[in-house]
């Protein structure tokens, strides 16, 4: 029992250190098995990010104008994640919107240089999230901020466990091949346990956004012949924006 709990804590810390800038203990090399086992705890990492965002919003809302608070929230999210998912989103946009062959798109996504499609997509995404956060009612904003990163990481779990890899190498390969059959059910259970106490609106919004994330992952897999670590980031970012959009819609 104690060994299993200790292993779970270690796997959660691996997920936390990979998906955020939060470092617990000295940095170390992660094995493929550690990366795979950590996938099931992605929604829990999302909850940690959401909690920080909700607390930041609570602290700022009493002293700053809404548009200033929203800007600081976006900066906080970028800082917490080290822009990891934004980077994947931008690389994916550069490749997909180049409208080249499958092999060429994958080469473009691997290129460290930033293209016009990446910059345009990043600008549009930031403006969309800024607008949606600003339009949410003050009473709904804390809940949406908490659910948003949970749904985004759950959508990543769906992408990781449901679709093949487009490359035979890359960091995403370790997460995909070693996640195991329990990654999805455990992550789904954690997601439900975290979101359900917030009410039916949170559940409906989270489910709808994850379905959209699944649809995006399926489309990207069809275009690229599988997914990559960059596309995981893209799925996360689009799902998070969808949470805010669906929350307003519902």
Image (tube, rainbow, N blue to C red):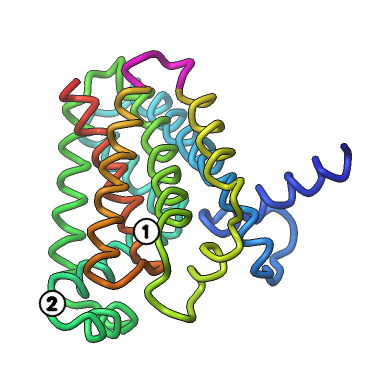
Q: Residue at x 42, y 70 (%)?
A: 165
Mark 2 and mark 1 in contact? Answer it, CB < 8 Å. no
> What residue is at 65 percent from the left and 54 percent from the top?
37
Left or right of residue 141: residue 184: right
The image quadrant of residue 41 is: top right
Q: Which residue is mark 2?
A: 98
Q: Is residue 250 left or right of residue 62?
A: left
Which of the two labelled residues, at mark 2 and mark 1, occupies the earlier sequence position? 2
Q: Residue furthest right?
A: 2
Where residue 139 appears, as percent x and y from the top left, is: 31, 15
Q: Looking at this view, is 226 or 87 the one in front?
A: 226
Q: Is residue 235 above or below residue 247?
A: below
Q: 10 Å neighbourhood of mark 2: few (<14), some, or many (≥20)?
A: some
Quadrant of image for the N terminus: top right
Q: Assign the C terminus to one quadrant of the image.
A: top left
Give the number of marks: 2
Residue 160 versus residue 142 in the image, above or below: below
Q: Which range is magenta?
A: 196-202
Q: Secondary structure at mark 2?
A: loop
- Queried whether the magenta region covers residue 3, the answer comes back as no
Q: In the figure, 129 relative to 176: above or below? A: above
Q: Position of residue 86 (x, y in %)?
A: 33, 60
How would you classify the magenta stretch by its main secondary structure? helix
- Give the residue number, with chain letter if any, for mark 1: 233
């Amino acid at each position: 029992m104690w060994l299993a709990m200790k292993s779970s804590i270690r796997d959660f810390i691996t997920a936390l250190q990979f998906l955020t800038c939060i470092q617990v203990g000295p940095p170390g090399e992660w094995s493929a098995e550690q990366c795979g086992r950590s996938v099931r705890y992605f929604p829990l990492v999302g909850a940690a990010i959401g909690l920080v965002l909700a607390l930041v919003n609570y602290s700022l809302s009493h002293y700053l104008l809404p548009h200033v608070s929203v800007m600081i929230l976006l900066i906080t999210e970028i800082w917490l994640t080290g822009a990891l998912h934004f980077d994947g989103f931008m690389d994916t946009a550069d490749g997909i919107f180049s409208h080249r062959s499958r092999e060429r798109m994958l080469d473009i996504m691997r290129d460290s240089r930033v293209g016009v499609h990446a910059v345009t997509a990043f600008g549009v995404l930031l403006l969309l999230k800024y607008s949606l956060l600003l339009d949410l009612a003050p009473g709904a904003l804390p809940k949406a901020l908490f659910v948003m990163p949970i749904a985004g990481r759950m959508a990543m779990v769906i992408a990781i466990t449901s679709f093949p890899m487009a490359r035979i190498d890359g960091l995403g390969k370790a997460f995909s091949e070693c996640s195991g059959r329990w990654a999805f059910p455990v992550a789904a259970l954690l997601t439900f346990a975290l979101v359900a106490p917030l009410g039916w609106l949170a559940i409906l919004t989270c489910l709808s956004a994850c379905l959209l994330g699944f649809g995006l992952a399926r489309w990207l897999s069809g275009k690229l012949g599988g997914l990559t670590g960059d596309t995981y980031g893209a799925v996360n970012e689009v799902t998070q924006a969808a949470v805010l959009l669906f929350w307003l819609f519902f």
